[in-house]
Image (spheres, rainbow, N blue to C red):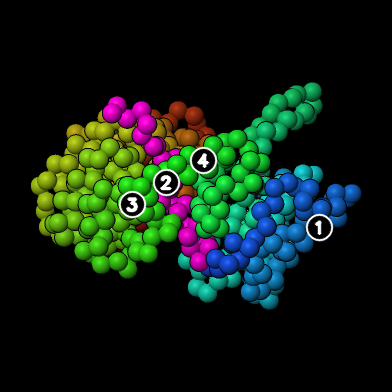
Amino acid sequence: MFGFHKVRPPLTTFQRVDLELLMRKTIETIGEGRVRDAEIVTDLNDLRLDTSTAGRLLETALAAVRRRMPAPAAPYEVDVVDGDDLGYPSVYRAAEDQSDAKILIAEESLGDALRCVMELAYQHARHFWQMQADPTPLDTDPRTTSLLPICCGLGVLASDASLYDEQWSQAGWTGWSISRSGYYNAVEIGYAMALLARARRESDPPWVRVLRLDSRDTVHQAWRYFDDREQKGGSLLFDSRKIPNSRSSMHDLHSWLAGDERTYALAAALALAKQHELPTSVIKAAIAATQRGDTDLTVAATRLLAKSKSVDSDAERRVRELIRSHVSEISLAAILSAAAMDIPLAEFSAKISKLLDWFAGDPFALVDAIAVQGRSLSSLGAKMCSLLVAAIGDLDDERIDTLIECLTRIADDPQRLIETQIKPREVRQEALRRLAVATATSRNHA
């Protein structure tokens, strides 16, 4: 009665929603029969690779990948390039003009058979989705493409390759680094493998026993969660006959958002986010959803509060409460909704300043919301300058331009602010140069 035996689902609500819907789409695209018939590779040796030379490894690894994965509608070439020039273990380049698409694989990747196979598999999958009729951005996103090798029997290898602990030695120095092959980590791959077993109608397949431990534990946790959902009369998004999406009726989306199943509520909130305006009943359901204690659902529902067809005092009150949340993602969502609702944010300047530190690497949405508030948030000028210093140091043009634009909106004299707040001479000069360019561009567009 104290919840000691309560079945806890693996991963976060968003991760489960994302993986269930994307695994579902992947299987529907390549066919359930192909997925059920796919041989699950449990050991790299099963691929019978020729590792005698780098060239032979590439040739046999590519053949193994093509043998197990669906053929794309158009061919691609594979080129080996220097890893320092490439910057990644492998890269996909779509076809241009009369040339075929290309997979560029780093020369260093050919020194590791497992990495070589998985990099080729992931880029083959990227090309396969690129060749689908009218692919959406999500179709060609690694969130989707990285699941295709798993559905074609390479999930055990994907789990093994999901984390690399590499030692290095150079010029008398030694160290280690961690890198990943593929988009998903081992725990996420474990959940995808549990869904794969469900699609293949396997209850305890032998391949589970050879999965690396973190993936294997997730598979077993997922199976307990699946059984618990069924015993309670619930269903997974993965195999439900009707799921929330942008084509669903407003009535159905409202029912899912207000329902007890959090995965359906979150999927409904994500679909509702594509609407321009929402009726009062949905706004009320969104307010209630923010009170259910699930971070992912709260973030998604908070974003809906700015979509009311009319001024909603309850929504405004709830947004103000959520800005004060100790969870940064929730606070950010609330601030963005507040900006869209024209709620003044001056009283939350200290909170916003902390969030700017938290999201310093990806501040764009927050900085845009600050810019909309104009001079009322002039107190954040010094913080913007500190972020500008970091952006210039990183040579991040997009961040620099966004921060400069914000400074021109919130500061009475942005030039004076930069001169007084940015101490390093070269950085200050670059900031002033960028400001001059932005000012001239703005005048030309006026």
366 or 429, nearer to the observer: 366
User: Does the CB distance between marks 4 and 1 fall below 8 Å?
Assistant: no
State the SS at label 4: helix
Which residue appears at 28% of the width and 37% of the height? 293
Viewer-nearest of discs 4 and 1: 4
Q: Is residue 310 visible?
A: yes
**According to the image, label 4 marks what residue?**
220
Quadrant including the C terminus: bottom left
**According to the image, label 3 marks what residue?**
234
Distance, label 3 to label 2, CA atoms, is 10 Å
State the SS at label 2: helix
81 or 231, nearer to the observer: 231
Task: Tell me the crowding category of disc 3: few under 14, some 14 to 19, or many 20 or more residues within 10 angstroms, Cα based.
Answer: some
Quadrant including the N terminus: top left
State the SS at label 3: loop
137 or 129, nearer to the observer: 129
Against 149, residue 134 (above or below) is: below
Q: Which mark is residue 227?
A: 2
Which residue appears at 36% of the width and 47% of the height? 231
**According to the image, label 1 marks what residue?**
60
Q: Amino acid at mark 1?
A: Thr
Q: Is residue 141 visible?
A: no
Q: In the rendered structure, which disc, 2 or 4, sits on the residue that comes first in sequence? A: 4
**Seen from this angle, which residue lies furthest bottom?**
98
Q: Position of residue 5 (x, y in %)?
A: 37, 31
**Magenta stretch in the rendered image:** 1-28
Distance, label 4 to label 3, CA atoms, is 19 Å
Distance, label 2 to label 4, CA atoms, is 11 Å
User: Does the CB distance between marks 2 and 4 fall below 8 Å?
Assistant: no
